[in-house]
């Protein structure tokens, strides 16, 4: 019995995590919707993301044809530009999971990775997703360039910034700053009226 | 092009639901519609199979297991996600991959009906 409880505890520690402390300085910026550039003409792109939560210590490295595209930590995302056609991706830890997608020219697709419960460590689970799921994931940040693969698969942050700055991309609408309200006019002190005895 | 025209699609990716709450996966692609010997190529099929993932439920079970003397977290291995199914008659959106000139359906008969 005690052994079973220990095993459950091991599985728990491998798949669950304490809440990651929010970066207070970047909280305001994180609330803005993530701007995704349009793919280059004639090519498609896939946005891989991993919602935060359980299994934060488990890696979810996305590979294609045995070559690493990028690591995908908890609460991270990256954009991969790809030629149109069928692409097969895999993630691996204790077990391997694979996903095939049909990349279409000039379109963006989404795929998510979650860590599910495993025997010794959590197992990454990669699956097709929608833009709504991507938008619903809170506080996603782009993968650091250091964690991306050596190839040209994942767009580096500077490449994304350059693509967003291109004139063909419509920038994300930002809320206009609200003008501060005019201060209320100071009211003159009113002298207390003397009550008259009737 | 009348409704009910036959076409061709392809299953790009399929995976049944698995243990630990993993949902089933289904990725489909539309290839073409065929009518009167003419093929209209299609692309960009948008179809959400909507399989439910129970991975978060298993994680919640594990958290509950940590506070319980009974190792109920092990039950998570036997909890599966939903299956990805696309039922017959499901309406999906796809784009045409090329410009095509289609002959209207029997224009002579249509004009007769209008006259009557």
Image (cartoon, coloured by chain):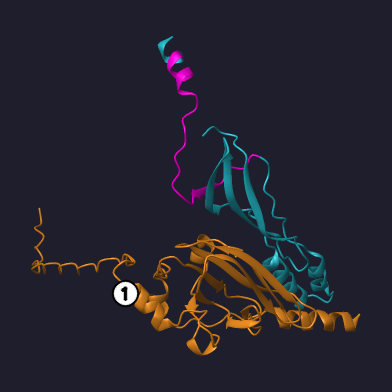
Tell me which residue sits at (44%, 39%) in the image. Answer: B101
In the rendered image, the quadrant that contains the C terminus of chain B is: top left
Residue B5 lies, with reference to residue B72, above or below; the image says above
Residue nearest the viewer, comparing B114 with B73: B114
Q: Hey, which quadrant is residue A133 in on the image?
A: bottom right
Q: Residue A158 in the image: x percent, y percent? A: 39, 83
Residue B2 lies, with reference to residue A152, above or below; the image says above
Q: Is residue B71 left or right of residue A89?
A: right
Q: Residue A161 in the image: x percent, y percent? A: 37, 78
Q: Which residue in the rendered view is the most extreme toward the bottom?
A: A146
Q: Hey, which quadrant is residue A63 in on the image?
A: bottom right
Q: Is residue A1 left or right of residue B84?
A: right
Chain with colour cyan in the figure? B
The residues colored magenta run: B89-112
Q: Is residue A165 left or right of residue B36?
A: left
Q: Hey, which quadrant is residue A187 in on the image?
A: bottom left
Residue B4 lies, with reference to residue A196, above or below; the image says above
Q: Residue A93 in the image: x percent, y percent? A: 72, 82
Q: Residue A87 in the image: x percent, y percent? A: 61, 69
Chain with colour orange in the figure? A
Residue beneath disc 1? A165
Check residue B102 for magenta coloring.
Answer: yes
């Amino acid at each position: 019995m005690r052994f079973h409880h220990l095993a459950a505890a091991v599985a728990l520690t491998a798949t669950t995590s304490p809440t990651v402390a929010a970066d207070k300085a970047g909280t305001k910026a994180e609330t803005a919707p993530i701007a995704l550039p349009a793919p280059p003409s004639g090519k498609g792109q896939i946005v891989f993301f991993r919602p935060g939560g359980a299994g934060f210590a488990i890696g979810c490295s996305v590979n294609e044809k045995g070559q690493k595209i990028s690591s995908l930590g908890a609460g991270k995302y990256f954009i991969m530009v790809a030629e149109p056609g069928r692409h097969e991706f895999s993630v691996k830890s204790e077990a391997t999971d694979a996903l095939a997608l049909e990349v279409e020219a000039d379109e963006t697709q989404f795929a998510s990775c979650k860590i599910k419960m495993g025997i010794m460590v959590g197992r990454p689970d990669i699956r097709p997703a929608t833009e709504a799921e991507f938008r619903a994931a809170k506080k996603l940040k782009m993968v650091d360039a250091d964690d991306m693969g050596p190839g040209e698969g994942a767009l580096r942050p500077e490449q994304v910034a350059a693509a967003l700055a291109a004139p063909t991309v419509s920038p994300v609408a930002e809320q206009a700053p609200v003008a501060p309200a005019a201060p209320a006019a100071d009211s003159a002190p009113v002298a207390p009226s003397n009550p008259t005895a009737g | 092009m009348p409704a009910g025209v036959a076409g061709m699609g392809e299953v790009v990716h399929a995976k049944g639901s698995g243990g630990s709450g993993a949902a089933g996966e289904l990725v489909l692609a539309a290839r073409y519609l065929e009518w009167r010997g003419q093929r209209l190529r299609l692309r960009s099929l948008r179809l959400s199979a909507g399989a439910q993932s129970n991975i978060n439920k298993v994680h919640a079970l594990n958290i509950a297991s940590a506070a319980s003397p009974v190792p109920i977290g092990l039950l998570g291995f036997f909890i599966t996600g939903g299956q990805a199914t696309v039922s017959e008659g499901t309406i999906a959106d796809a784009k045409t991959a090329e410009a095509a000139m289609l002959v209207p359906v029997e224009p002579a008969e249509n004009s007769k009906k209008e006259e009557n």
